Amino acid sequence: MSSIAYKYGKSLYINMTNRCTASCTFCIKNKWAGKFRGNNLRLKKEPTTEQVIREIKNPKKYSEIVFCGYGEPLLRLEELKIIAAWIKSKGGKVRVNTSGHANLVYKRDITPELEGLVDAVSISLNAANPSDYRKLHRPAFGLKSYKAVLNFAGKCKKHIKEVTLTCITLPGTDTAGCAKIAEKLGVNFRLRPYLDSYENS
């Protein structure tokens, strides 16, 4: 099975990198030994744009193509933009699942570069304050990451049709607080179930 692309529901997920800007305490990457529903997502080498496009084949077969996997997809921004442009040219829909740290990584606002290429973005929040966020996510950029995530969400709203803040249902997580933050920013909010036991179906 491919470590680059895997089906989940009606969507196709693209695993661009195993590198990440966070080391989340709840991440299933290590707990599940790099696997997800029978797919080994440990990359020996990051895929080229051509390899990813070959794996997708026909974007219209899927409800959406999701850049996600076991890493931060926006760490490969230039490659993602090329692939997303190809997907859009073939009539597909593009979603990016992200930590929201990209503007810290590139030291600029990258959200205008996603306009017309990305239809939806899901940003992992999971905490209603900077301290809890740092404890949960252990971000490479420290405490300032939390404010940067909220700023990123606000900027995405100007360029991307569908912006969603997500929160996993971990014990002690302030889901109501996260929902209020999303409402204040004027973006969507979605609760995600915490994946604990390995799913091989």
Image (cartoon, helix red, strand yellow):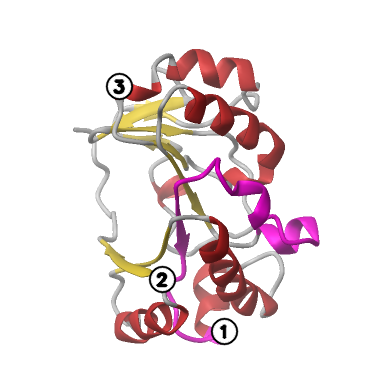
Query: Could you tell me the amino acid type at mark 3?
Result: Lys
Question: Which residue does the image show at 28% across and 77% down from the upper left?
Answer: 171
From this view, report whether residue 68 is shown above or below residue 168.
above
Is 62 or 52 nearer to us in this picture? 62
Residue lying at the far left in this picture: please name it: 201
- Quadrant of the image containing the N terminus: top left
Q: Position of residue 6 (x, y in %)?
A: 37, 27
Q: Are marks 3 and 1 in contact (CB under 8 Å)?
A: no
Q: Position of residue 90 (x, y in %)?
A: 45, 22
Q: Is residue 59 magenta?
A: no
Q: Which residue is mark 2?
A: 187
Q: Is residue 157 left or right of residue 177?
A: right
Q: Nearer the viewer, residue 129 or 106?
A: 106
Callout 1: helix, strand or loop?
Answer: helix
Does residue 85 appear left or right of residue 35 in this picture? right
The stretch of residues the image draws in magenta is: 102-131
Q: Decide: few, some or many residues near mark 3? Use Cα within 10 Å; few <14, some 14-19, many ≥20.
A: few
- Of tags 1 and 2, the one toward the viewer is 2
Q: Mark 2 belongs to which amino acid?
A: Val
Q: Which label belongs to residue 130?
A: 1
Query: Disc 2 versus disc 3: distance between alpha carbons?
Result: 28 Å
Closer to the camera, 30 or 108? 108
Disc marking residue 61: 3
Would you say residue 122 sits in the magenta stretch?
yes
